[in-house]
Amino acid sequence: MTTRAHVLSTIQKEANRRGVTWTLVREGGNHTIYALNGVIVPIARHNEFEARYTETIYKECEPVFGKGWWR
């Protein structure tokens, strides 16, 4: 299990390292919607995520960060 805060922090650090924007767009019904340099990344509002869901979120960032950036 990975915490939501850890996932957000990991993406934010990588965005800062690469000089791209990571911004909160809006609060959706069950998700918080972020934009990563124009790529929309919805993140559920759970305190902890299973490994599969964490990987799904990271894969949504691949168009900006590149394949397998989190490994």
Image (cartoon, helix red, strand yellow):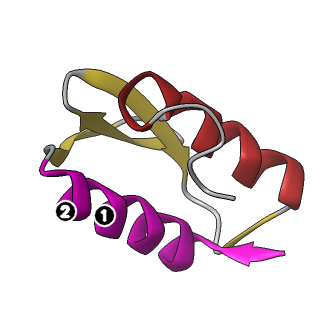
Q: Identify residue for label 2.
A: 16
Q: Quadrant of the C terminus?
A: bottom right
Please, is residue 47 above or below residue 59 in the view?
below
Q: Who's the residue at 60% across and 32% down the image?
A: 67
Residue type at the position of mark 1: Gln
Q: Specify start and end residues of the magenta stretch as a single range.
A: 1-19
Q: Identify residue for label 1.
A: 12
Determine the main secondary structure of the stretch shown in magenta.
helix
* Quarter holding residue 15: bottom left
Q: Nearer the viewer, residue 14 or 38?
A: 14
Q: Who's the residue at 60% across and 44% down the image?
A: 58
Whether tag 2 and tag 1 are in contact, CB under 8 A, the answer is yes
Can residue 17 be found in the magenta stretch? yes
Please, is residue 48 above or below residue 39 in the view?
below
Q: Who's the residue at 55% across and 29% down the image?
A: 60
Q: Who's the residue at 86% across and 61% down the image?
A: 50
Residue 61 point in image, percent of width and height: 47, 35
Residue 65 point in image, percent of width and height: 41, 38
